[in-house]
Image (spheres, rainbow, N blue to C red):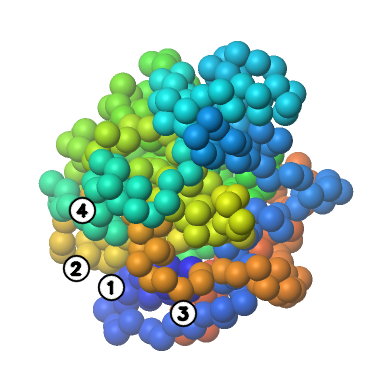
Amino acid sequence: MLAAVGTSTLAASVLDASRSGQDPLPVELDAEHVAVAACSERYARQEGVDAPELFAPLSRFWRTADGWLRLHANYAWHRRRALRVLECGEDATDVAHAISRWPGEELEDALFAAGALGTVVRDPADWAAHPQGQAVVRAPLVRCDPGPGPGRPVGAGRLASSVRVLDLTRVIAGPVATRTLAAWGADVLRVDSPHLPEIPVQAVDMLPGKRSTLLDLVEPDGRRRLEELLAAADVVVQGYRPGALARFGLLPQALVERHPHLTVVTLSAWGPDGPWAERRGFDSLVQCATGISVVEGDQGRPGALPAQVLDHATGYLAAAAAMLSLAGVERGRPPQVMSLSLARTARWLMEAAVPVIREDNDQVDPDPYYVTLRGADRPVRVIRPPGRVDGSEPTWTVTTEFGSDRPSFG
């Protein structure tokens, strides 16, 4: 996490230097602050509301006929699809019995085919031999390709101020990227479908510094408004699975053909190549597939990292990629089309072979790192963003309520 946050902080300094014509300024990190920020969803609070459970009851490890599989059922529609595959109700005993009858990989494939989520727990060697694991090995940590350009410089200013970011993301990694850009001064507008409600704790933790609007892209007016936003934006960050937005003309190459000035950053679970490229996935499931759950396990049971490290690290790297592309545009280079994945970040973590966050980080007092923000229905307390560029700290001054803003930049 220190490396990822440090990279994004350095990128903010480089962007600042590109806009001012000066040398990059020195940066600082507080390791304890980074550790707390990597668990930010654990600490986010809405005033007067108790801390929620971060995972739904069915989002856990289950024994299959030949090993272990983890379900992800935090969203109601994923839970309903999984239960249809399992042909049972939500009672944990019934779910356990249903899953125990399935070979793990057969259930994994059946859940995918039904639009649900569940991933077999594999050891690192099995993942290395898997076709998707091999596709991930061939990928760079951040893939960068020049767009058709030319870019549109944002001009003089500090850090990311006046940069317009269109946020088409959902769960943790993408929202971390865009809230990081907001903390360095960017004008961030998150766009969601009116048909996909957000989990309240995720909205509390991931909306600071942004505005949030709803657009129905099935409707012509929604598509028209989105095209207006794309024309006005400098950066687009996408966090939906590859191909999910293709019918709306939002594949990266289609985007930059219509709007060549854009920097486009795409995040996915498994990467843009390989047989799993279009599969849904979340941090906890990528940990299962890549061997992390085996490494973190004990006495034959799988385990998990004590934070959603893959999500957070990928988010900070994505923010860095966006800012470095903008810095290049300021110097006359074309904007970049970039992609990152949780699975490739997992490989980076496994290659590092050092603990990123350990359980004793729970002993870090989060209180010095809180900030209270207004703008939602109730004030919220969240962990303020880490890092510093020559004394300038990233900051959020307001937040918002999910879907409550107009579809326009400030």
> Residues under labels 2 and 3: Cα distance?
21 Å
Viewer-proximal residue, 350 or 357? 350
| Mark 1 → mark 2, Cα distance in angstroms | 7 Å
Circle 3 residues within 10 Å: few <14, some 14–19, many ≥20 = many
Mark 4 neighbour class, 10 Å CA radius: few under 14, some 14 to 19, many 20 or more:
few
Judging depth in this view, the residue of 335 and 84 nearest the camera is 84
Q: Earlier in the sequence, mark 3 or mark 4?
A: 4
Q: CA distance from mark 1 to mark 4?
A: 32 Å
Query: In screen coordinates, is 316 left or right of 147?
Result: right
Foreground: 115 or 403? 115
Residue to which mark 4 is pinned = 138
Q: Is residue 248 visible?
A: yes
The three-letter code of the residue at mark 3 reads: Val
Q: Alpha-carbon neighbours of circle 1 within 10 Å: few (<14), some, or many (≥20)? A: many
Q: How many marks?
A: 4
Task: Give the Cα separation between the discs numbered 1 and 3.
Answer: 14 Å
Disc 3 marks which residue?
Answer: 389
Viewer-side label of 3, 4: 4
Whichever of callouts 1 and 2 sits on the residue coming sooner in the sequence is 1
| Mark toward the start of the polypeptide (2 vs 3) | 2
Q: Residue at x 58, y 18 (%)?
A: 86
Amino acid marked by disc 1: Ser
Q: Give the structural element (helix, strand or loop) at label 3.
A: strand
What is the x, y in percent for residue 98?
Answer: 61, 22
* Residue beneath disc 1: 18
Residue type (three-letter) at the residue carrying disc 2: Arg
Circle 1: element type:
helix
Q: Nearer the viewer, mark 1 or mark 3?
A: 3
Residue 76: image location, x then y, percent: 63, 25
Task: Give the labeled residue for mark 2.
Answer: 331
Q: Is residue 217 above or below residue 136?
A: above
